[in-house]
Image: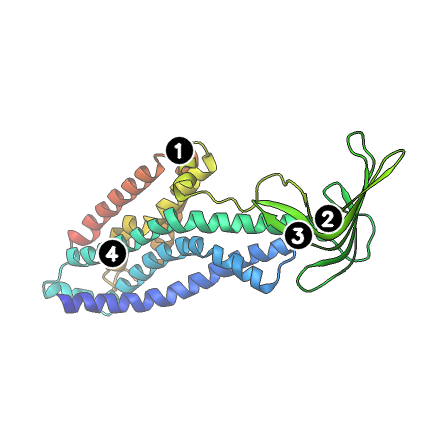
Amino acid sequence: MHRVNHYFLKHFSSLFSSLFFILFFITSVIFFIKITALTAIIQMNFLELGTLYLYLLPKTLIYTLPITFFIALCITLFNLSKENETIVLFTLGYNPRKIATLFLSVAFVLSALLVIDIFVLIPISKQLNSNFIDYKKAEAKFNIKTSEFGQKFSNWFVYIESIDNTKVYNGVTLYQNLTAKESEKLILASTATIENSNSLLRLALDKGKIFEFHPNEIGQVDFEKMYINTRPSSPIGYMQSIAEYWNGVFVDQKRAYDLSFFLLIALFPLATTYIAISIGIVTHRYDKHGIYLFMFTTIALYFALTTLLSTWHPQSAPFIVFGLTFAIAYRIYQKRIKAIY
C-alpha cells in the first residue's frame, strides 16, 4: 500500500510542480503589470518594484496553489487511467477509497497552510504594501527639484540649489506669505531632508536662520535643527496587529468579503478532492475528451459561487459554499467511482 501511495504521489508531485510554476508565472506577470501601472503616479526603481512584488507573494500563492492542486490531481489520475494503471490497481485490491484518503490528507495539509497564509501573512503583507505605496505617493508630492521657483512644501514655497545622491537638499530657502493668522516668514538653511517620523512626513532643516517680517521690525532666530511637519490625510507606516486587522471583519464589509473569499479559495482543494477523483478516474475507452470541460466548469462554478455569496453574506458564505461543494463532490464520487470500482 505504501508503494502504491508513493507511486501516486510521485506522478502527482511531478505534474503539480510543473503546473504550479506555469500558473505562478502567469499570476506573477498579472500582478507585476498591476504594480508597474503605479509608475504612472509615483517613481520607483527596480528594487522598489521587487519589494512590492514580494508583498504580493502571499496573495499570489492563494490564487495559484489551490487551482494547481485540483488540475494536477485530475490530470494525474486521468493519465494513469489512460494507461489502464488505475484499473489494474483496483483489480489487485487497491480501492478508490484509499486514493481519496491519500489525497484528502494532502489537500488538508495544503488548505491548512493556506489558512495560515490568510490569517498571518496576508494582513502583514497587505499593510506593508499599502504603507509603501502611500509613502511613495506622499513622497512624490514633495519631490522638490533644483533651481525651480514656485514649488511648495505644505504651505511654504521652496527653492533649493542642489540635491545629492542621498536625497539631501543643499542651499534651501523657504518662504511663507502673509496671512490672517501667520506673519510673513523667510527661512534659510544649509541642508534639508524629508523624513518619516511617527507616520508623518516632515522636512528636517539643518543650520539656518528664520526671518519673521512685522510692520515695524524684522525678527531673526538662528537654529541648528528645525522641523516643518505636514499632515497627510492618513497616517503612513501604521501597522495593525493581526488580531486588530481581522477584528475589522465585523465592521468593515470589504475586509469581511476578503476573509470569506480567500478562506473559500484556501478550502478549494479540500472541497473538490472527490470531484477531482471522479473526473480523473475514467474508462479511457469511453471518456476521452470530457476531463478538461469538467475541470474548468468546476473551477468556474466554485469561484462564481464564492464571489456571489461572499458579496451577499460573507459571514456565512464559507460554511455554505464549502459544505455544499463537499457534499455534491462526495455524491458524484459515490455515483461515478465508488459504485463502479
Q: Nearer the viewer, mark 2 or mark 3?
A: 2
Query: Type of residue at label 3?
Result: Ile
Check disc 4: other Cα within 10 Å, few if <14, some if 14-19, many if 20+. Answer: many
Q: Tell whether 23 sits left or right of 228.
A: left
Give the distance between the C-alpha atoms of the residues marked 1 and 4, in whole angstroms: 31 Å
Q: Contact, CB < 8 Å: mark 4 with mark 3? A: no
Precedes in sequence: disc 1 or disc 3: 3
Color scheme of the displayed model:
rainbow
Query: Type of residue at label 1?
Result: His
Q: Nearer the viewer, mark 1 or mark 2?
A: 2
Residue bearing mark 4: 277
Q: Nearer the viewer, mark 1 or mark 4?
A: 1
Q: Position of residue 75 (x, y in %)?
A: 31, 63
Residue bearing mark 1: 313
Determine whether 103 is above or below 245 in the image.
Answer: below
Precedes in sequence: disc 1 or disc 2: 2
